[in-house]
Amino acid sequence: MTDIAVMATGLRFPEGPVVLEDGSIALVEIARGTVSRVALDGTVSVISEPGGGPNGLALGPDGMLYVCNNGGFAWHEEPGMIRPIGTPETYSGGRIERIDPRTGACTVLYESCGDTKLKGPNDIVFDRAGGFYFTDLGKARHRDRDQGSIYYAKTDGSFITEVVHPILTPNGIGLSPDETVLYVAETEGGRLWGFDLAEPGKIRRRPFPSPHGGRFLFNQAGYQRYDSLAVEASGNICVATLMTGAITVISPEGELVESVPMPDVYTTNICFGGADLRTAYVTLSGTGQLVRVPWKRPGLRLNFAP
């Protein structure tokens, strides 16, 4: 794609882009342990330093930033590329945090659901009711990995419930325009699932052979892994696709709409902005870039977006 505009470089594995009221982009730098801001002129500044591994990011109904913190990764670096390779000795535990974008003050909201500790919270989306769904991908070790989960929680720290368990490496998460379907991208299987919602925080569970109550929607031949996702106003699901380096656009019926190539095998996140929501902001994490791409179709305006 020739019309990619680079907004910022030198970022330390950026993910979770969020368009702020002034048009700047908030995002996480996982390897730096920060929530950062990219100004319209490309200047990068730090909003907050929660440490660990800030991963997914979303604006809540109170104007605060809500962060999925995976507790940190071990990293491999080589010229021009950085990539996560497992769980570090300094792993600080998974958690959900609230950050004031004006002051950088960080509050830990959740570190567990009942007796179950959060392992590697990854991505987050708010519904119209003001609650949020988030994925917990878990952590990988040399000879084993955690089972993943999907949770629903409130912003005041008073309520969290497990919606789906187990699910293999759940990563990107989003809602259909009418909020009747919760979409979840599975990293290691490279699969997209739809979970029909009965009410906020509860799914209509599909019977066997569904492994977790969801509807299988899509996967592709060949080796690719799915990361974060965003939804278009039409209902199409745009999944950041690792290894092939692309944004894979999938219809609600589970058909491939198109694959938009990107110049990084770690194409990790996408969000929409601009006056008509026809600008896609994409994180190219391996090479440490935030880019801007004109999009054919308008994105879905997120709840509580400016």
Image (cartoon, rainbow, N blue to C red):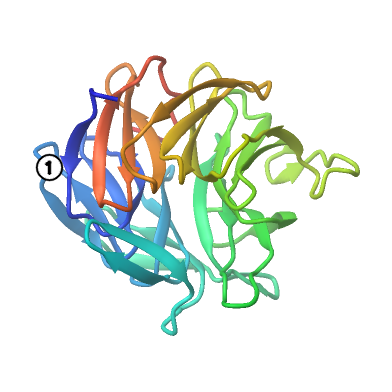
Q: Position of residue 5 (x, y in %)?
A: 19, 31
Quadrant in the picture for residue 191: top right
Q: Quadrant of residue 38?
A: top left
Q: Quadrant of the N terminus?
A: top left
x 21%, y 49%: residue = 37
Q: Residue 149: horizontal and vertical position, in percent?
A: 67, 58
Q: Which residue is mark 1?
A: 42
Badge 1 amino acid = Gly
On screen, 251 above or below 56? above
Q: Residue at x 62, y 29 (%)?
A: 179
Numbered disc 1: secondary structure: loop
Viewer-proximal residue among 306 and 36 = 36
Residue 192 percent location from the top left of the image: 64, 38
In front: 44, or 129? 44
- What is the tally of numbered marks visible in this picture? 1
Whether residue 65 sits left or right of residue 149 in the image: it is left
- Height in image: 94 above or below 223? below
| Quarter occupied by the C terminus | top left
Q: Residue furthest front?
A: 222
Which residue is rendered at x = 52% and y = 41% of the image? 126
The answer to whether residue 74 is above or below residue 169 is below
